[in-house]
Image (tube, coloured by chain):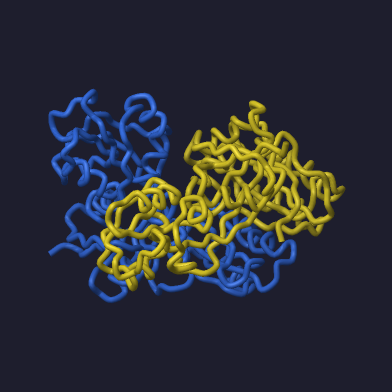
Chain colours: A yellow, B blue
Amino acid sequence: MGKRIAYLGPPGTFTEEAALLYDKGAQFIPVPTISGVASAVSSGMADEGVVPIENSLEGSVTDTLDLLIHDSPLLISKELVLPVGHQLLVKPGTVISDVKVLYSHPQSLGQCRRFVERILPRADVVAALSNAAAVQDMMESPTPSAAIGTRRAAELYGAEILAKEIQDQVSNVTRFVVLAAEDHPPTGNDKTSICFSFDDDRPGSLVEVLQEFSQRGINLTKVESRPSKESLGRYFFLIDLEGHRQDTPVGEALDGVRRKTSLFKVFGSYPRYK
Amino acid sequence: MGKRIAYLGPPGTFTEEAALLYDKGAQFIPVPTISGVASAVSSGMADEGVVPIENSLEGSVTDTLDLLIHDSPLLISKELVLPVGHQLLVKPGTVISDVKVLYSHPQSLGQCRRFVERILPRADVVAALSNAAAVQDMMESPTPSAAIGTRRAAELYGAEILAKEIQDQVSNVTRFVVLAAEDHPPTGNDKTSICFSFDDDRPGSLVEVLQEFSQRGINLTKVESRPSKESLGRYFFLIDLEGHRQDTPVGEALDGVRRKTSLFKVFGSYPRYK
């Protein structure tokens, strides 16, 4: 039996696509919330969990980061980067001139606005709770209609792709992470994600921390400050860096960061997605 | 006649609440997209525009940042911070035990999940295109129903607030900015937002830039890196700092940053929202 992988469902979401990309042979468990995915893994119901972490359409990135910062003993063992492609789906045989209704998740609609204005200017737009639900609603509709959905949803629900890659921008990607009890052993081409905060916010605290990396020639691939939930004036910093926490220079830099910060957490080291 | 303010509409959205908070006496122009709000201001149809920039429910933050980075000659002249409160709205006289259907924007539903699971576990959930549309749909529904919406939408559409502040987390805030042809003159308690990028991504580039601020005792209130659209390996950095670009130390630091970066843009200086 394959690995059991929980993911932010239902089937037909972009997170399911990411999970399939990661391990086609696994046994998949769709879970409706990000914290539910983490619970499935930490309780042993699943071996690993796949959740969106950046530029997501279906789940809030904030939920994943809050989980990693506050709630979860899980680590990031892998990252997955998926181009987010929207497709115009119809019941097989439907032609565009017949389409009266368009089903879409509001955010996906926003990302395909130009296409919809040009090609379906007179369609009634009906909101759906997820990209998968939009396709289900379209397939069940008695009126000739279309849905904005994924390739996978077309497969799952027997829909036909009438127009491909209808999003306004070409290079829209979502980053997903695999959560597990352990992170990944070194591969020679790794990334490490960390989070830290300071008790005070005097100028220069962040610079001193970043120097731990720059002095050792360690490149940062992401730097982000997020307001902390506890008090409005305080911030968490989220940093992704090149290298594994078991590499000597990275390990030394992380020790230095730990000494200069009040809260410090390593989210995990994992192979870099090319 | 008052100022003409374009905002991300329709009426009843959180952005409208922010615009009303900013200037109750203005003449308001709802516009359905963030780029449309900017066009309304740059074409002279409106004097100023209000759009969400952080932790938004209705518009994508990415849209606002992309606009400021790539497309718009407009500057930030003000920031507005609004607690995001969700209310359970019904037609006047409806009691909770009668409610069969719940209308909600999918993201708002996600933020009120615990309340909905406890109080309306058996309601059919119907997605709406915006928080305002959820309330309109509820008011027009022949079935006894409820909607997740704003206080303002309750006023506008004649709905009754059956339960207040039903979001799972108390401290959910959204930050909005006012876009205008000019930014704000110094007030003594200001912030400045800037954006920059590097031609190469050698370790230490960011540290050298941040030292321009730390050396002069200038505090940063936000640091964020975002992947650039043109090429996947390159990043934009977005920084908010304390002080006005016309203050001598801030002006000197910004000159230093300009020399050390390839792309450099000041989004504006504006009074700090307490």
Q: Image point 40% across, 43% down: which residue?
A: B173
Viewer-nearest residue: A147 or A174: A147
User: Which residue reaches farthest right?
Assistant: A248
Camera sees residue B78: no
Q: Image point 66% across, 66% down: which residue?
A: B233
Q: Quadrant of residue B158?
A: top left
Q: Report whether B194 appears left or right of A254.
A: left
Q: Image point 55% across, 63% down: which residue?
A: B249
Q: Report whether B65 appears left or right of B216.
A: left
In the rendered view, would you say B21 is above or below B179? above
Viewer-nearest residue: B89 or B185: B89
Figure quadrant of the C terminus of chain A: bottom right
Q: Report whether B183 appears left or right of B103.
A: right
In the rendered view, would you say A182 is above or below B177? above
| Residue B264 in picture, x, y percent from top left | 55, 71
| Residue A25 in picture, x, y percent from top left | 69, 46
Q: Image point 59% across, 63% down: which residue?
A: B227
Viewer-nearest residue: A209 or B86: B86
> Looking at the image, how many numbered discs can be counted on the residues?
0
| Residue A107 in picture, x, y percent from top left | 41, 55
In the rendered view, would you say B123 is above or below B149? above
Figure quadrant of the N terminus of chain A: top right
Viewer-nearest residue: B101 or A65: B101
User: Which residue reaches farthest front?
Assistant: A93
Camera sees residue A160: yes
| Residue B219 in picture, x, y percent from top left | 56, 52
Q: Quadrant of residue A124?
A: bottom left
